[in-house]
Image: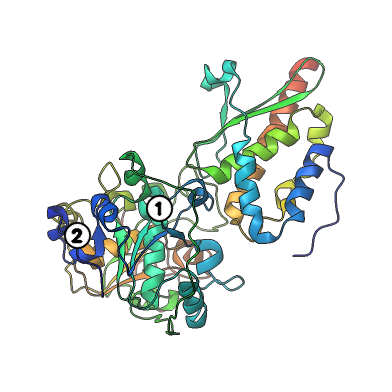
Amino acid sequence: MPAPTDPAAKLAEYAHPERLVTTQWLADHLKDPGLVVVESDEDVLLYETGHIPGAVKVDWHTELQHPVIRDYLDGAGFAALMSAKGITRDTTVVLYGDKNNWWAAYTAWVFTLFGHPDVRLLDGGRGVWAAEGRELTTDVPAPAPVDYPVVERDDHTVRAFKAEVLAHLGHGPLVDIRSPQEYTGERIAIPDYPEEGVLRGGHIPTARSVPWATAVAEDGTYKTRAELDAIYTAGLGMSPDDDVITYCRIGERSSHTWFALTHLLGYTNVRNYDGSWTEWGNAVRVPIQQGTEPGTATGAAPQGMTA
Amino acid sequence: MTTAPTAELPAAFAELRDAFLEVPERDRLQLLLEVSYELPPLPARYADAPELLERVQECQSPVYAFTEVDDAGVVAFHATAPEEAPTTRGFASILAQGLTGLTAQEVLDLPDDLPLMFGLTKSVSLLRLNGMAGMLTRAKRQVREQLAARTV
């Protein structure tokens, strides 16, 4: 049985209000059976300094990613992970994390690859919970292992690979979630972050630049339905039935936008390209556009390449 | 992971390294957290004049650090990072404990791959370990600059 939907008025405006919860709702439902709170942070030690009572941790680096290949865990691995966290297929999972839920949204996206039915985000994440002076604890729960079925990862519905992005050029919108400097090619890493071994700067031709932070208010909560529609639907001329691909540097910031488009605005066909710029910017002979213009699907193709 | 040939590290760094390598891999993050709590507060002269510190661009969190060499040629490393960045604070604390008290030459002789020696390469992303390398690189440069200014 899924937990009830948070009736907050702001959430009711969204296409799928059941995908987001407010801090007050979570505080009221922390002890609900069938609900598990999961923290996923960029800083892999932040959970240990204190977390929402009862919350378990999912470490994106060691638990979601394959230890050798650039990929995610498989169906058996996911089932084992869920079992260890006390999550059954029927559990309502509420995710939250630092940096306004960058990594929590990424974890939500990975859970979606395995079709976990009820995955929600805490609006505003860890920052809002802490700013409101709500309880944090260092007590780490030790859930008893539960049964979770082995569900094969679906790599098609919400995930896009490089070849699919290439085929997509000229046929549908691309949204680049990185900073403006990364988009133009002036930088190859997030400002204030280390350069990370990308050989070329710029963006995928035709991609429109909407940095991820555009989607959130000052406190890190998602903007209202009307504001988000103005940014993505009106602002980019997209419509909810468009085939949309989002990307960023490694797919984590773009998960945050994937979540907004899919669950808050009701877009039905949004895929996240997790290879993102760290793959595209290193790939041989893929088209790249530099500067502020999106560019055209064919205009940026290298000479001799039949695009 | 096969460990690289053990470099001769100064005692404080060697002790820290051994402490990390002695615990199972899954417990090393917890140890890093404990070390992070030991990051000393900035001395008042820096706390009151943050412009004396240098931003460590390689770190994902706003980290400010400064290394000073006193008249006897002994080094002290000061750093500050936000509470919500415990991993970064842990790295800064390792450096504060390891660098402070060394001679300038001992600091310059430290291996540049020091951050890889604590057995954390699997539990912490390489990007973050780069942040610690960035702090060390800057510490060495600041030591070099202060030595150079002295010989003029």
Chain of the residue under label 2: A
Residue A265 is drawn in which quadrant?
bottom left
Chain of the residue under label 1: A
- Residue hosting label 1: A53
Q: Which mark's residue is nearer the viewer, 1 or 2?
A: 1
Pinpoint residue B71: horizontal percent, then vertical percent.
79, 14
Pinpoint residue A120: horizontal percent, then vertical percent.
30, 64
Taking the image as shown, residue B75 lies to the left or right of residue A226, namely right
Name the foreground residue: A287 vs B149: B149
Which colouring convention does the figure follow? rainbow
Crowd band around label 1 with a 10 angstrom C-alpha radius: few (<14), some (14–19), many (20+): some
- Which amino acid type is marked by label 1? Pro
Task: Identify the residue at horizontal 33%, vertical 43% (top origin).
Answer: A134
- Which amino acid type is marked by label 2? Asp
Which of the two discs, 1 and 2, labels the residue nearer the N terminus? 2
Residue A6 is marked as 2
Can you say whether A99 is above or below A229 in the image?
above
